[in-house]
Amino acid sequence: MSNQDQSSSAKPPSTGRAKINRQVIIENVKSIGVAVFLVLIIRSSIIEAFKIPSGSMIPTLLVGDHIFVNKFAYGLKIPFSDFFTDRPIYVVDRDPPKRGDIIVFKFPKDEAFYYIKRVIGVPGDKVRVRDKVVYVNDKPIERVPLDKPDVIASIEGKQYDKTSLSLFEETNSTTGEKYKVLLDRNTYITESYGEMSIPEDHLFVMGDNRDFSYDSRFWGLVPIKNVRGKALFVWLSLWLDFRESQYYFRPSRIGTSIY
């Protein structure tokens, strides 16, 4: 065989390498696609990360807390079902939110936004507020004052007059768990509310920062279908605001359980 014949029948080495490179790229794209799809399924039905942008849940949650939310807490839903229907479709039903749960939900007035609040009233309850004391079914939520000046001193934000802030510990009548709430003695607009009867499939929610929370006292009830999950724990606490020259990093809050 002549040299000319050999050169015409031989396959250039670059062609073989290009074919291998294409196969590697295709396999990598497939792997990345599967990984992204699995992440989206987990986010849709099991667990998802959220960031706290406001102080309405101080002292339980701080501005800049990054939290994980358990989306399986109230049932296992078909992934992405809430994108195609007006409510999630569940394949496994679990108990609905209880009093005291901290939930993430779609804001009823604009479902493009997510809010986080504490459940105060469930279907069948009657809720009212008198002199900043919350009553559920005519019984005040048990609370005691806390003398923790360090907690008050650590609260961040120019809108707070720390000399008028008071810290209390409330007790969840359903579970017995205790949690802290913050009150401002100089704010009166939120001093009294109600009475509100909670209908079926709805929740009454409030922020733990009672006098600086935009919640059910102002805009109404949360449809249970809007609930996306129950807050679990803080995985990062970091806040950057270049306009206000604010920077907060709180490593001690990493791993803090939310209740």
Image: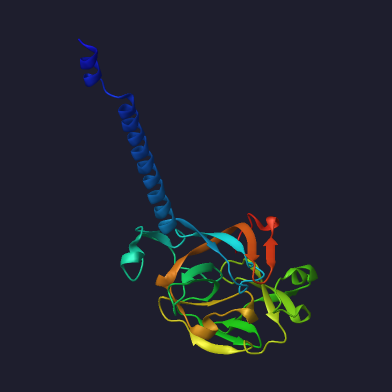
Q: Answer left or right for 201 relative to 54.
A: left
Q: Residue at x 64, y 64 (%)?
A: 240
Whether 2 is drawn above or below 155: the answer is above
Residue 12 picture location, percent across and down: 30, 24
Any part of residue 138 in sight: yes
Residue at the extreme top: 1
Q: Quadrant of the C terminus?
A: bottom right
Residue drawn at the location 40% of the way across and 78% of the way down:
200
**Residue 189 placed where, x, y %?**
63, 89
Query: Depth check: 134 or 82 in front?
Result: 82
What kind of colouring is applied to the model shown?
Answer: rainbow
Residue 79, compared with residue 158, is above or below; it is: above
Residue at x 66%, y 89% (from the top left corner): 188
Closer to the camera in the image, 6 or 206: 6
Locate residue 255, reporting x and y percent: 63, 54
* Front-lying residue, 63 or 186: 63
Q: Quadrant of residue 108?
A: bottom left
Q: Is residue 153 left or right of residue 211?
A: right
Name the quadrant of the N terminus. Answer: top left
Task: Look at the picture and state if 146 lies above or below 253.
Answer: below
Q: Quadrant of residue 160 in the image? A: bottom right
